[in-house]
Amino acid sequence: MVALMLCVLLSYGLFYKAALAVAGARANVELLMSLAMVGSLAQLQLPEAAMVGVIVALLDGVTMATMHMVNQRLSGCMTVPQTEVTLADQSKVLAAEVKVGTVFLVRAGEAIAADGTVVTGKGTVDESRLTGEAEPVQKLKGSTVRSGALLQAGFLEVRADAEVDASFQARITQSVQHAKDTMSNTQEVVGKFAAWYTPSVIVLAVIVALVQRDFRQFLVIIVAGCPCALLGAAPFTHAAALAVLAKRHGLLLKETAALESLARLEWLGVDKTGTITTGQFTLVEMRAVGKYTQKDLLRWAASIESKDNHPLAQSLVQSYTGCVAEFQGSGALPAVSSFKRQGRCGVMGVVESQLVGVGNIDFLKTQDIPLEGKAAQALDDWCSHGTVLFVTVEDAVAGVLLMADALRGDARGTITRLKDLGVVPVLLTGDKGPAAHAAAAAAGIDQVHFDLLPDDKTTFLLKASHGAQPMSKPLVGRGPREVGFIGDGLNDCPALASAHIGIVMQEIGAAATVEAASAVLQGDIGHLPAAVVVARRTQRLIVANICLAMAINAAVILAAAFVGIPLWMSVVADSGSLLAVLMNSLWPLCWRLDPVPDGSGKD
């Protein structure tokens, strides 16, 4: 009687799911286990029936506990969201009530509730849980901040650019949950296999029972043929791999199919600006062509540009001060008087009793300053490598500056590691030829295509997926060759959507770009090779799980058909196979792969 009550208590959910399967005219795991339990009860084998119920309940508990552990690992990369925020008038509201345009305060130790722009204040923000970058980031007026980042020190007044539910951290949570809920190609194949495998097991069990005239062997094969371990081979492993990629490598996959595409990646289209380069201009080279030293010219130029808000101005100031904070004004730069902007081509002012100007070739023309000698030679040498600026003192060119988009410190190492993994990197950029070839050479990319429109990038991706040569007839639809694309700009949206796996650099990617991509890389590009390795190991682990589950099932079914075994042994074997697959699926949580180090020389 105790065994009977135990069966009823532990098997309510099992019988409920089995009833749904019968109503839907399909056979599932719960139906097989229910048949085994009912058959045991019919033969008055109450202890064995109770054992089936107990083991099913225990396995459900172990499965839930394991998935909870995986989810906890994943949630470790998130900051606990703010439930309340303080508005500019010092009143407090729920974070969910923050609207676009709302100005809220962030104090030291608080997490930023919503994506926004700093209106006033200055602070040090820890973005390590978002980007994987351990070094805190200085945020000033005009800086963008993302939800989930933690303000370590200082004070910020932020204007919300998105509601809390549409902000960065919320999108991360939604994307990961969506990825866990989607089915990969492997899961679809296994599911289709199980759809005919399960009825086949029932038919086989009936045949064996009739031949041996032993109804107990029917129950044994029903339990042994249960495909629960087979069905769990992929989703358990995928869940663990998604957690590892998100937490340790800053790569968020929107669907598990993208994980398989990453594992099979053969060809990768790479955007230039903001992907293998920083997307920010830096002073690459400088020539003094007059009587003044480079140090004096750079100090004067930085002083003049500190009064301007052009992006090149900030880069030039930073090249002298070494700190963006100095852009806001510092005693380290000499005072400027009579500051004047000359349209869009340059600026002028008086610094240390010298009339100093900084601008491009058009600036020289507006000031009637001749370009000759060493200055003209510098323009010829550098015009194809970046933006050339001239520093004038009084009415003559005194220095020439080359401003260019610098290569990311980990770009070359990343490309080298990808090549070692058998991935062919190809630079696809809308930039001009000289700049594209210079960036490709610095990064170690052998194939370069430049002056491309957004549709041109898509065409190259489709041709590569079909294994077609660049000059062949354009093809429609993805081919069998797995191709990927990594970029950041709005012009990359078609390419990101066309690739088997489109990866967007979240650091500067626009919302539409993130929507078009199938993966979001929050951290440095140096994490990409490690992510490919994780994806490939995951696929091998899934194959091992499938083979393990099938081998155990086959062994028990054969033993029941030709030798005959007790029901409890079949239950233990089935439970053991599921437990083995479950434990084996947790290996990704133990993988430790280092990203490509940043060789930029930054501290």
Image: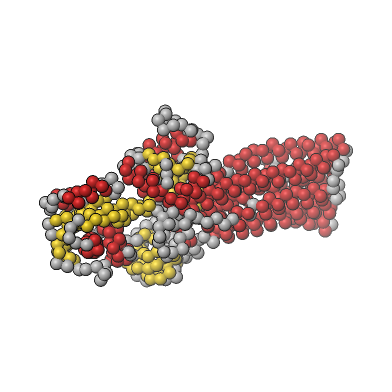
Q: Is residue 311 above or below residue 562?
A: below
Examine the rendering and report whether any part of residue 417 can be seen. yes
Question: Is residue 96 among the parts visible in the rendering?
Answer: no
How far from the left and from the top, in percent, is residue 251?
A: 50, 52
- In the image, what residue occupies the spot 44% across and 31% down? 469
Q: Nearer the viewer, residue 424 or 227?
A: 424
Looking at the picture, tell me which residue is in the foreground, 548 or 79. 548
In this rendering, the answer to whether 388 lies above or below 136 is above
Q: Quadrant of the C terminus?
A: bottom left
For the image, the number of numbered tags is 0
Left or right, 533 with respect to 441, comes to: right
Q: Quick check: 203 left or right of 76?
A: right
Where does the N terminus fall, quadrant-wise?
bottom right
Left or right: where does residue 343 sit relative to residue 64? left
Q: Residue at x 25, y 63 (%)?
A: 295
In the rendered image, the vertical position of residue 305 relative to residue 459, given as above or below: below
Give the quadrant of residue 150: bottom left
Name, please, the residue furthest toward the right.
Answer: 213
Q: Position of residue 592 (x, y in %)?
A: 57, 57
Instruction: Give x and y (percent) for residue 332.
Output: 26, 70
Residue depicted at 71% across the width and 53% down the height? 579
Picture coordinates of residue 286 (x, y %)?
A: 26, 56
Residue displayed at 71% across by 45% down: 549
